[in-house]
Image (cartoon, rainbow, N blue to C red):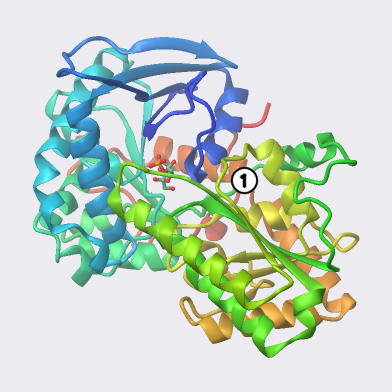
Amino acid sequence: MSNRLVVVSNRVPAPGEGISPGGLVSALLPSLEASGTSVWFGWSGDTTAGPCQDRPPRRVRARGVEYALVDLSEAEVRGYYEEYGNRVLWPLMHGLTAHVADEAVAAYVSYRQVNARFARALLPLLRPDDLVWVHDYHLIPLGEELRALGWSGRTGYFHHTPVPPAEVWSSLPQGALLADAFSAYDLIGVQTERDRNNLGDILLDADVAARVAAYPISIDPERFREFTAAAAADTPPLGLPDASMLFFGVERLDYTKGIPDRLEAYEHALATSPEMRDGTRFVQWAAPSRTGVPEYQDERDAVEAAAQRVNVRFPEHPLTIDFDPHPPEVVAPALEQADVCVVSSVTDGMNLVAKEFAAVHSAENPGVLVMSDMCGAAEELTDALIFPARDIRAMSAAMRWAYYMPEHERRGRAARLRAVVDGHTSWDWLREFVTDLREVMPRTRAPEPRLVHPRPTRHERGTPPPIEVGRP
Ligand code: F6P
């Protein structure tokens, strides 16, 4: 029997919505398009001036995916998305409690209302044997809202951001309510073993905690490499730098990514290794994100100030910063052109840029990945130069080693990084989660879950049987 997969997320790559940055879309979209039968439900990206009534979602079919889209009112965008989602939950999940906006905590009311409205709009679309897969912190209570409406089908949740330690979680007034909301899910996926341990500490119900497992998200490396092959060779996306080694950073402009620290570390590297002033250039792309949120405006100022400081200090003007958004078709050849990719997140659920960089380099075209230990990807990409997050001197030292690294080491590391990414792709991630969701004893229909304690790892469980969703 095959089941239809119904994906639910706040951000939906709806046709005509332009570039949709972030790991969620890049990991899911290729697989869902190939399946030809999946439904993707979420926010249309459109906003209405007045309150939104309960009305059926707008249905659009594109490239094999059926999108079911719901508008949000201006007040909902502010309360549910900007305030509670991005000024409370986002910093909390990253353990950055100093960034939690106290005045935004009351927007929990709006957050719950939107989750309830999403559930009411989604329920009529569901068939009894659908697998519902809810994504990310915007929608933690969605499963609970669906259950309250009588939905009893299999429902899973995947958490894309890090899970903070229990003491950070409980600093939130609604921490216990949110923890309870996980009880509605039959299976709960997180990115890493660290996240699994943290969520296990947060969930008081042992049956629910036993349903949490790590499913590290990934990319489709072949598809990403196709973008590099299609790029025009005569127009390198990073330009033609007058230096032998090109450093590169690319991400959403977000304070969790540690961009000002990264630029300071590069400045420190130039100060301590003068030959790098002529020998290197740094290109930073930072696509504006969540621009309605004050903390993100502050971050742009901080990045600009750090960039200016480097270029004023060094007459070679080694740093170029670009705030334009770029689609994956342009990011891929840029990553291929870069000699060194710097990922300096303060904390990060996974960081797919690191995997994309690994995918487009090889022993023949080696690139060096410099990455903080608080990225989920650091658990897998152990051939990166990994430094302690926020440690500017250690990051600078890693950058300098990337510059001086002998060719044979460069080649060996690049080959091993690529093998890791090729060995576990977004297709594997999706197949593993969906297979487990289909096989797990549903929580709502049984007093005891059937999961073994402790839960076996993905590798111990072996290869799951084929399912409908996957590469054809
Ligand atoms: O990766 C976390 C995440 O919130 C995703 O859910 C989302 O696609 C991405 O960041 C981009 O964020 P936003 O949807 O707020 O632009």
Q: Position of residue 354 (x, y in %)?
A: 62, 58
Residue at the disc numbered 1? 219
Instruction: List the single residue furthest toward the bottom.
Output: 272
Q: Regarding mark 1 in the picture, which secondary structure is present there?
A: loop
**Mark 1 near ligand 1 (CB under 8 Å)?**
no
| Residue 271 percent location from the top left of the image | 65, 86
Visible residue check, residue 344: no
Q: Is residue 140 left or right of residue 286?
A: left
Residue lying at 18% horizontally and 17% vertically, measured from the top left: 52
Write the residue at 62% across / 75% down.
266
Residue type pointed to by label 1: Ile
Image quadrant assignment for residue 452: bottom left
Who's the residue at 27% across and 39% down the image? 139
Q: Position of residue 340 (x, y in %)?
A: 73, 66
Q: Position of residue 79 (x, y in %)?
A: 18, 38
Image-quarter location of ligand 1: top left
Residue under the image location 36 percent in, 18 percent down? 69
- Of residues 160 and 1, the one nearer the viewer is 160
